[in-house]
Amino acid sequence: MKRPAKDLERASRVVTRRGLVLGGLQLGVMGVLGWRMQSMQVEQAEQFRLLAEENRVNLRLIPPERGLIFDRNGVKLAENSQNYRIVIIREDAGDVDETLARLARLIHVPPEAIETAKEEMARRSPFAPVPIMERVPWEDVARVTVNTPSLPGIIAEVGLSRLYPQREELAHVVGYVGPVSDYDLTRGYLATDTDPVLREIPRFQVGKTGVEAKMEHDLRGSAGTKRIEVNAAGRVMRELGRVPGTAGSDVQLTIDSGLQSYLHARLEGESASVVVIDLEDGDVRAIGSAPSFDPNLFVRGISVADWRALNENKYRPLAAKAVQDAYPPGSCFKMITALAALEAGEIDSQETVWCPGHLDVSGTRFHCWRRGGHGNINLHESLKQSCDVYYYDVGQRVGIDKIAEMARKLGLGVNHDLPLSAVTEGIAPDKAWKRTTRGEDWRIGDTVNASIGQGYVLASPLQLAVMAARLGTGRAVTPRLVRTVDGVPQPSGGGESLGLNENNLRRIRESMFDVSNHRRGTAWRSRIEAEEMLMAGKTGTSQVRRITAEERARGVTSNADLPWERRDHGLFVAFAPYDNPKYAISVVVEHGGGGSTAAAPIARDVMLQALYGGTPPLEAYPSADRGRIDELQQQIQDRAQQRASEGRDRA
Amino acid sequence: MSYLEYQVKYIPAGFRKLLYINWPLVLLLAAVAATGVLMLTSVAGGETARWAEPQLKRFGLGLVLMLGVAMVPLWFWRNMAGVAYASGLFLVILVEFVGVEVNGSVRWINLGFMQLQPSELMKVALVLALAAYYDWLPVTKSSRPLWLIPPLALILLPTFLVLRQPDLGTALLLLTGGGTMMFLAGVHWAYFATIIAAGVGTVVAVFESRGTPWQILADYQYRRIDTFIDPENDPLGAGYHITQAKIALGSGGLTGKGFMQGTQSRLNFLPEKHTDFIFNTLAEEFGFVGGMTLLTLYGLIIFFCVASALQHTSRFATLLVLGVAMTFFLYFAVNMAMVMGLAPVVGVPLPLVSYGGSAMLVLMLAFGLVQSAHVHRPR
């Protein structure tokens, strides 16, 4: 087929023209592409580079090392121990079931631990290490390490975990740590804490109770950071750099762990609490509540059975009774009533009150503990023999407001700010207090009850020890628990003079001396024999039930015949040595019966231990008791040794 | 005997033909392919066995194929146009029945030694067929409506089949490539103007009607269109990839982060880094300079093709070479626009660089035709 040349030529022109148009268009598009590249890679390069860096680099926090807690002699109360754990990395493990089975043949792995690990593996990325077991004994770690080739993906890691070497002896003081919870962060004490470690490090350990919680900010330190490179799947490729954090501050407590240890051994079997205060600077030398618990259980994650056992125990091991619980102080309160009356000039030391065994006040009969009464009795004898009627009378004369004022002056009904959980303020009741809290008027019967430390009066063992300390020194001794933070000494709690009349104080002290050292004193049987260590104290017995008229008529049921919950609390407060007071002590034995039988012996034993800075010579004890005391000391030493060896096994 | 031969004054024969090959073009192709091999080494983390080596072998094969095609006189290829088109169409239809499914679309036929993507072959076959058609058709008839039907059918048939796979990118390339051929052949511009106007009108109508009582599409369809046009609206889904791709490209800066130092690609933030998004690795590691160099290489390839085409007096050769150039251009232009976030992601590889056998071989075949035209042009 032949075509006209003219057409062909025209067509050729069209193709050339249109080809050039297309070429131009293509050039234009390429120009746009080049312009786009220029704008992204040259003009916006910095911005994109930043985005790429953000993609690639993650900041991870390095948990700070928690500060240690020491006692006054440098004994560790809370430390960070190395803890081996076994983890599995799914992507390296190959057949996970087979690998875990092989591990279980090698060392003992609880089946539930395997189940938990499998569940967690299913939830997390294949490269994330999932813990199988914590706190693995060294032999097992060695076994796993030696068999690494047959256990792909299984690694023994080392980490730090909190350890409380004193175990139950300081559980209520030092407290314990645990993983930070939602509650802590929303409504708990960390709600206003913005430290990123709390939210970014999974299971970050924070103080839950006691010093660990109250001094959290000193102990925690601040986190370091590391910059790591991650890929799109979040896998860590390498570390690019790190900024080390700062470890938490070490905290030194005023506690003497030797005394504390003795105290706990001495309280074994009781539901009781003891506080020993150093009079020089208010140092709390020992503060114990029995029974106690092992705080390490909580760090490891307490089992349901253990938790239930602690929670349902009627002796309440979890409660720090020494500071949390407030008891009617009973006769221990009588010094306050007496001192208030002396200071107000309502009585003088020779004035006597007739005690027939009871006193009728506006139609109600108030009884003295001694049915037959004490007859004519003065201040000195009333304290020594703990006559109630004397105080019914004197209390009414001086009035509740002055008594309450004296109580607060001596440390009752006020908050002593120790870094411990749930420190109670107690109650030093007065007219205004009853009006605001109960909406009722104060009645004269309330004064009568309060004058012997019953009724509305409530005091914690800590407050009672402070009272004894202030009576012994005349200074406003304030308890302190922390000696140094990061080596910096904390202010002394020695206190200034209370401004009380020294003669009045001396009268009270003399009476307290006779309580312990006079044949007719209520604590005579628990005296200290050693000349230079003589103790001055006061017993207290606080009723927890109401004694009805019929019961009184047929004779008050003795404590031994009552169920435990209904027995009286036994209390004792003291300071020693009498000539040159160094320590004050308070003892409360819950439902222990009378203060002279239940509390005073404990106070005497602990006080001697404190005074001698260790086991006292038997000569310090009354000769009649020495055989029994020797036996008891032997038992306590055995127990302490046994506990120490148990502790070694478990650590 | 076609009119081609009448105008031939001198045609080299035998191995002398090799001297008349457009060697600068071969060099440019080799440079682009080398860039591809380099980048494939980089995205495999320095490992060559994974992608770089197979790609290099394929390029070698493609080179041999190209030279082989170049040796054969162009008139033979013109006569084969119908056969090529028919077999291409047959293979595309075959995909419907024996296709292999990858990522939810069926585009491949398993040949045992490689996965063939017939739609790639179809792109060249269509150019060949249309060039042959307009060479045969008297020039005066090219704008007559009746004579528009066969080329339209030639274009729309494979386009429709490819859309079914679904492969939007290839369909778009077929449509645009075919349309360009018709435009070059001298079909009256009014047709194109009408079609473009109608297209624009439809799009405007679809979007303008949104939210009015006479809305054309359903709401979910609009949402799909939104994501398609601007995937960054959906940063965790479709948008994630394009965002990461743009970060890779932009963060390269002027000179790039260095060979195998591209964090976006090495740490797998970049999707499809060895195929559709390989340009971003190049741009990340060699920066604006690297990107522009590749773009320039591509531009030079186009330039050499167009220059060669315009030297022909043969209508078939001119149309064919311009058509191949346009097809090649569409490949890289669409791919680059897509990875730079200028166009929706439709799945078009970067020619001679992206990992993939079909596109490489088909493109080398097409350049073989270009070379054949170059060798056998009248001198």
Image (cartoon, grey):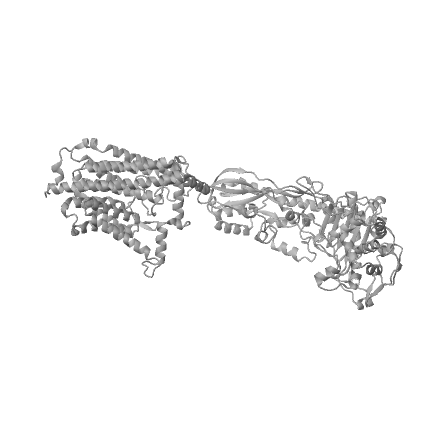
Residue A290 visible, this angle: no
Q: In the displayed structure, does residue B100 sit left or right of residue B68? A: right
Q: Position of residue A356 (x, y in %)?
A: 87, 63
Relative height, residue A81 to residue A590 (above, below): above
Residue A41 visible, this angle: yes
Q: Position of residue A40 (x, y in %)?
A: 38, 40
Q: Quadrant of the C terminus of chain A?
A: top right
Q: Quadrant of the N terminus of chain A?
A: top left
Nearer to us in this view, A633 or B106: B106
Q: In the displayed structure, does residue B170 sit left or right of residue A527? A: left
Res A259 → quadrant: top right
Nearer to us in this view, B338 or A439: A439
Q: Position of residue A534 (x, y in %)?
A: 84, 47
Q: Position of residue B306 (x, y in %)?
A: 23, 38
Relative height, residue A594 to residue A483 (above, below): below
Q: In the displayed structure, does residue A441 sit left or right of residue B356? A: right
